[in-house]
Image: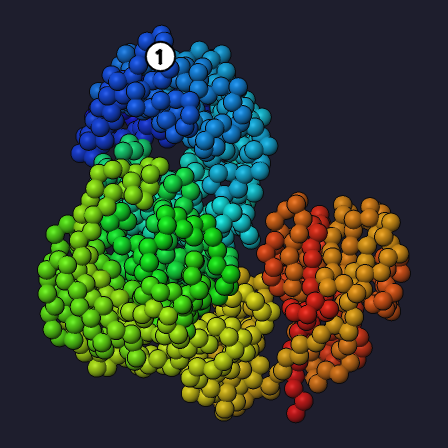
Amino acid sequence: MSRRGLLGTALVGAGGLLLPARLASAAEDPYALLRKNWFAHLTGVPFDPDLPSMREAVAALGESAKEFAASMETGADRDKLWSDLPLGTSSAPARTSFNRVKQMALAFATPGTACTDDEDILAKAVDGLDFLMTTTYTEDLPPRGYDNWWDWQIGIPNAVEDTATLIFDHLPSDLVTTYCQRIDHFVPYETVTAGTGANLLNWCRILIVNGALRGDSDKIKDGIAALSPALDYSLVGDGMYADGSFLQHTAHVAYLLGYGATFYDMISALTRLLTGSDWPITDPDLANIHNGVDRGLVPAVWDGLGLDAMRGRNIARITSSDADTGLMVANTLLRYAEGAPGTERAARWKAIAKGWLQRTPLALADSGSVDLIARCERVLGDSGVRAVREPVGFKLYYENDRAVHRRPGWAFAIAASSARIARYEAVNDENLHGWHTGDGMTSLLLESDRKQFNDAYWNTVDATRLPGTTADTAVPADAAGANTRPTTTWAGGAVTPNAYGAGRYGAFGQELEAFGSDLSAKKSWFCLDDCVVALGAGITGTTDASIETVVENRNLHSAGTTALTIDGRRQPGRQGWSDRFSAPAWAHLDGVGGYVFLGNNSALQASRSTRTGSWLDINPYLGDATTDTRRYVTLALDHGSHPSDAGYAYLILPNATASRTAERSRAPGVTVIANSATAQGIRQDASGLTMVNFFAAGNAGPITATGPASVVAAQRKGGLKVSVADPSRTQAMVTVTLAAGLGTRFTTSSADDGITLLASDNDATTLLVEVGGAHGASRTIDLVTQPSAARPKQVLALPPTADAYIRDGDYATHNYGDTDEMEVKKSGSGTGDTGFSRRALLAFDTSNLPGKAHRAVLWLNGRANDSGGLHTRLQAFVCTGDWSESEVTWANAPATGAGLGTGWLTQGQDWVGLDVTEALTGTATAALTFAVWQPSDVPGLLTRLRSKDSGSDAPILEIVCDQNQ
């Protein structure tokens, strides 16, 4: 039998050194199965020890463990385990000490290391763990410990449980129980249930492994029960969103490839842990996780590189490059595939992961994880899995102000911020120079340069000049603007999505509000087949420092001499060179691509520089003082100081040759149809594809919008496909009119909910788009040409003739008809007399409709305002009986009838649309009254709704009906 076979046999055998007896007794002990599964998760067994990457990783594991064991203090009067990790004032040395002990236990338990079954290493691990549990991780500390709570409540308990699993057969049972009870002190159940996002997943893991170690079924069940809320899509705050986004922390940081990657990885690990056990995860919402992998994780990794736009403060960690993140996600995909053998989804995930692993610039052995290497090597060696190339398309993450455009050989990522999403995060002295990473930062990734952003980029780049950004060139203070959000709301775009939320083309934009100055701008990117069009307008500020829009700031690595050509003339290659070009037509960087300047731009400043920096400069918490030196070439449009309504327009042509760039400067193939503070848009000359970002009501070429909107109109044979979104999230409805140049006499072939063709004749086509409550998602309609115009419809937006709210209990005779806000809350079942239940009432005059009503939606603007939760569901009900706004009370209110449409509101002010079409039959001839409350099966949260007296965002009854003809 081969050694690989022996290792596999030893893993599942009844005894032996690879799997100690108490771990191997899963058949008799249900807890032993969990410990066996977690042991395999930690060690990666079974694996092929003859693979070069495995030999290297296993050897490195053994060597590091031997070094830790040799340097560990063992004296009776010791107050620490390692001289470089003093204990008692900072939490990081405590966490690192526990992890070194775990490393020794891992080297002891993993087959083939220099420490496998080494009694001295085992003795050091047992002694070190007991010392730390006796002197450092003690109950005389509060649950959050000192310094960084994460170390005490997540980092250390993870290390303790892993160590106990690895050497379980060598620890007395009562001591294991004592250690688990100590973890209970630092991670009480109320902490777990209050958790969100990735932190909640870590705590669930701690509970489940804790229960497996001490044989406590209730602890395992608690961990699984606490897991369920994380499996549902978030509507606000931390967690996973339906579009694939992932947010973490109160500032709402875009963290899909930080905490999000940990979140998905942990669920895959827990699923594997519980497979075949008495405690499987049966929550049907587990399917949401698989959708999140497809819609979120997969599009955020390109050629094995995790996009920096999604990685939060991880970009400032020397140990966490984009390649490291990509490798982690590949491993996560393979874990999920293991849990769904034989399915289409598993085959697809394996093919994607294999492609990433073949193209990543990171050596597998560098990951340091035997488990990861073993899993990745298995798929690499599986001839039945055919690696796939990167898919093409535009992916819009509308819930976290991010987008990525993928084409053959390149990808382009965009990062923005808004009143919903933080500019950037800097905590624990990490990511001190992330100043402009949410100010329209773009990242161009190329097959020919996969090391662009993982070769000392973030510690050497000029962080005031990140590609894509429009920014003040003054150097901010460390962490200036961190964890803050601008007040502007317009960020996002539109896309015609496929099943996984991506489309072929897309529009993206941002209303920029700089931190620390009055700089403002409107910025847009339109992503096409072979280029990206970047537009800027309304660039205004009174700063004394120069304001620039950075076209490119390319890392040339340690000795790069990439040729720069501007308008056909090759520029000097010496370091320190710079020059200014007043009106260039194009520029080209050899091996990178071309840049074509459209219309009236500011002067182009081009330069070469050599920059030196250390990771300690941007991350004193986890940084290294070793310096790196890299060369850069920078192209920036200089708007000067005190610009007023400045702008720019340029094409980015990834991988284009110099000759191709020159050709495109003469015939760009794209026409800018608008570039103002109101609207920015382009039209592709050959296809007629038209995309516009409206920052306010206006007109751009053939498209007119009645309010903020992003519009993508793609012509096709015999029809037109239109996608519309409201990235500002400020309206209930927007009307979009398409001029005859885009086509005439359309009828609807298919349409998303919320988008309606009102009219289409020889002159124009008009669409009604319900954008309220859509969170910036696109509504798409597919139109086909017909011989004659269909009967037109019109939309009415009726204001209430009366509105009020009523309250039960001691307030049952009080009238609340003259308030700016109406209150809604169902207390308990709503049938009691608690004094806490409230309902809103609204009356509308529908007696003068011009024709048959086809659709009716009650629009309300409000927010959940209750400590009991983050979001609530509202429902409209038909009411019968007369009432007066100034006299209505709970005691005399009209009766509540049939329930109608429902919708969600969160803690953030937003619109909610309740479908009340059933209340209108044909042409209504009387007034309608609606009550708004929570559905009968939903406990209520206090919700505040703006009334007709609020002055803005008052209720609306939308009615789509036939026009009189």
Quadrant where the N terminus sits is top left
Picture quadrant of residue 573 = bottom left
Identify which residue, 234 or 38, lies in the foreground: 234
Query: Quick check: can you spot residue 612?
Result: yes
Task: Work out whether residue 386 can be spotted.
Answer: no
Q: Which residue is mark 1?
A: 78
Is residue 332 found left or right of 919 in the rendered image? left
Q: Horizontal placement of 334 versus 201: left or right?
A: left
Amino acid carrying mark 1 in the image: Arg
- Position in image of residue 570 (x %, y %): 11, 70
Q: State the residue at coordinates (56%, 74%).
A: 734
Q: Picture quarter containing residue 896?
A: bottom right
Q: Which percent across, then down, holds residue 235?
A: 56, 53
Q: Residue at x 58, y 81 (%)?
A: 758
With respect to residue 770, does 127 lie above or below? Answer: above
Residue 108 point in image, percent of width and height:
29, 19
Q: Residue at x 20, y 35 (%)?
A: 53
Query: Which image quarter is the C terminus in?
Result: bottom right
Residue 577 percent coordinates (x, y) = 14, 62
- Kindly indicate the quadrant of the structure image that contains residue 133: top left
Element carrying mark 1: loop
Q: How many marks?
A: 1
Give 749 or 35, whichever is nearer the viewer. 35
Who's the residue at 74% across and 57% down the image? 823
Q: Residues within 10 Å of mark 1 (few under 14, many from 20)?
A: few
